[in-house]
Structure formats: structure tokens, C-alpha cells
């Protein structure tokens, strides 16, 4: 009886662990930085850590995620500067990627044959690309952020367009930090790159004088200070869900 009780308790403790704690990374340390060499965790949405054992993660090594994991979306943190060769090669379940602003180099065939990849969001300036980075990704569009530089289209053979939203991600959720769209009637999405949109940041839509109507999804629980301040042409705001928490002068 005691053995069964202990086994049951152990099982409950394992089930109680957060998903991120169950993710397993193989890695190597070099001059105080971490290179991810492999991944043995679950599929779905994977947020790569920016630190392991207190050291910054700066590179994803060659073929690190090439073994099938049923990945759907991947978030690459700002600490990463280099994405190695064939890192996500043939990950045909992958649909979206967010690439942090620190990435300056993506090597040969890093996203080759990701046949269901739809969106690749770059939060920083255009990185250097090796050959065949997006070969076979016929559905993919590259999105870049307002204020970043050196973009051109096609980029690595895929169309590159200005993202209508700039955003940050934390704990696998999205906060919109800015708007770069054409205004008019705007229906804000409830997910970006596979992650739920939960908040609209400070002054995210401020001074959008051509914005006439906005629909806010049920996933949004927080709208921060002056998020829609000085939107002189804004006539209507539609909320799909419960009343969110509001900061100061949201619609000033």
C-alpha cells in the first residue's frame, strides 16, 4: 500500500510540473554562453529560454530541432544571435515563428522544407541569410517591424511585408506595442504567431488619426495607459469579451 501511495504521489507531482519545466534541451557551454544542441521536449508551442543555468543562450546549433517534435510555433528569444544550419529543416508541422531582435545570422537551410510554415516574424533588423533558408516554404510570409532596417522583398525567396503590429511576448502570451497598419476599420486578432493576444500596451495605437473603428478580441484582458489616445477619427470600439482592465486615459 505504501509503495502504491508513493508512486501515486510521484505521478501527481510530475503532472503538476509546468510545461516549460518538462522541456529538455541538450546544450554546450562556450566562453560563458550557451548553444542549444538538441531538443527533447513536447511539441506544440515552444518558447526557447534566453538563459540556461544562469548563462545566456546565444546560438541554436546545427539541426537542433530537426528531429520531429510536432512543433506548431516557436519563439526565439532576443538573446539568440545565430541560428545554425538546418535547425528546423523539414519541421512540416511548424506554422509560425517569432525571431528575436538579436538574431544577426541565419545559416544554410535553417527552415528548409517547413511546408506548413505560414508566418515568420522578425523583431529586429534583417539578418544575414545563408543559402536555401526558406526553400520549400511556399506558404510562408516574412513580417518585419516598423523601425527596423535593411529589409527587401523577396527575402530568402519569400515575400516580406511590414507587420501591422509590433509586439512582445512573455509567458507565451502577446502584448501589442505598436500599430503600423493603414487604419480605417481594424479587427485586432486574438492570436499572433500562434500565441494568444492578452494585452494592448502603452500608447500602442496612440495618434492613429486615420483609425475609425476597432474590434478588440475576447482574449484581451488588459489595455494599458493611453493605448488609443489622440485617435481623432475613432468613432466606435467593439469588445468581443468581458470588460478588460483599463489603464489611464485609454481613449483620451
Image (cartoon, helix red, strand yellow):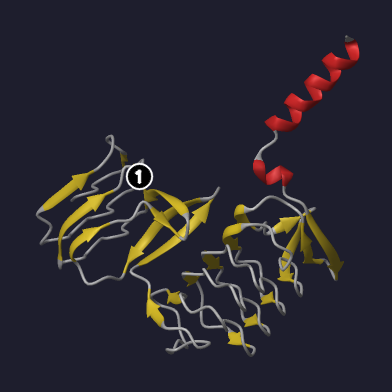
In the image, 245: left or right of 70?
A: left
Q: Looking at the rendering, in which quadrant would you find the N terminus?
A: top right
Q: Position of residue 87 (x, y in %)?
A: 70, 73
- 238 up-or-down from 76: above or below: above
- 19 up-or-down from 47: above or below: above
Please name whichever residue, 110 or 80, is drawn nearer the observer in this view of the structure. Answer: 110
Q: Residue at x 36, y 51 (%)?
A: 190
Q: Residue at x 55, y 47 (%)?
A: 171
Callout 1 environment at 10 Å: few (<14), some (14 to 19), or many (20+)? many
Marks counted in the figure total 1
- 47 up-or-down from 163: above or below: above
Q: Position of residue 182 (x, y in %)?
A: 22, 72
Residue assigned mark 1: 220
In the image, 73: left or right of 105?
A: left
Q: Position of residue 159 (x, y in %)?
A: 42, 83
Q: Position of residue 141 (x, y in %)?
A: 44, 76
Outermost residue on the right side: it is 3
In the image, 96: left or right of 103?
A: left
Q: Residue at x 38, y 79 (%)?
A: 161
Numbered disc 1: secondary structure: loop
Please name whichever residue, 132 or 32, is drawn nearer the observer in this view of the structure. Answer: 132
Q: Residue at x 50, y 71 (%)?
A: 120
Snapshot quadrant of residue 222: top left
Amino acid at each position: 500500500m505504501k509503495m502504491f501511495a508513493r508512486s501515486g504521489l510521484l505521478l501527481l507531482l510530475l503532472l503538476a510540473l509546468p510545461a516549460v519545466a518538462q522541456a529538455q534541451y541538450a546544450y554546450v557551454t562556450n566562453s560563458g554562453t550557451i548553444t542549444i544542441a538538441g531538443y527533447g521536449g513536447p511539441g506544440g508551442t515552444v518558447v526557447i529560454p534566453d538563459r540556461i543555468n544562469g548563462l545566456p543562450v546565444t546560438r541554436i546549433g546545427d539541426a537542433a530541432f530537426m528531429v520531429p517534435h510536432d512543433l506548431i510555433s516557436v519563439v526565439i528569444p532576443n538573446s539568440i544571435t545565430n541560428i545554425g544550419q538546418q535547425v528546423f529543416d523539414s519541421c512540416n508541422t511548424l506554422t509560425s515563428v517569432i525571431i528575436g531582435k538579436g538574431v544577426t545570422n541565419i545559416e544554410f537551410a535553417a527552415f528548409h522544407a517547413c511546408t506548413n510554415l505560414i508566418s515568420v516574424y522578425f523583431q529586429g533588423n534583417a539578418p544575414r541569410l545563408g543559402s536555401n533558408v526558406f526553400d520549400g516554404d511556399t506558404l510562408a510570409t516574412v513580417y518585419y517591424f516598423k523601425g527596423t532596417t535593411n529589409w527587401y522583398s523577396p527575402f530568402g525567396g519569400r515575400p516580406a511585408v511590414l507587420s501591422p503590429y509590433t509586439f512582445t511576448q512573455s509567458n507565451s502570451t502577446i502584448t501589442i506595442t505598436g500599430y503600423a497598419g493603414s487604419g480605417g476599420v481594424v479587427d485586432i486578432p486574438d492570436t499572433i504567431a500562434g500565441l494568444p493576444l492578452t494585452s494592448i500596451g502603452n500608447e500602442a495605437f496612440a495618434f492613429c488619426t486615420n483609425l475609425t473603428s476597432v474590434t478588440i478580441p475576447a482574449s484581451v484582458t488588459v489595455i494599458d495607459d493611453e493605448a488609443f489616445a489622440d485617435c481623432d477619427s475613432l468613432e466606435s470600439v467593439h469588445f468581443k469579451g468581458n470588460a478588460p482592465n483599463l489603464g489611464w486615459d485609454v481613449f483620451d
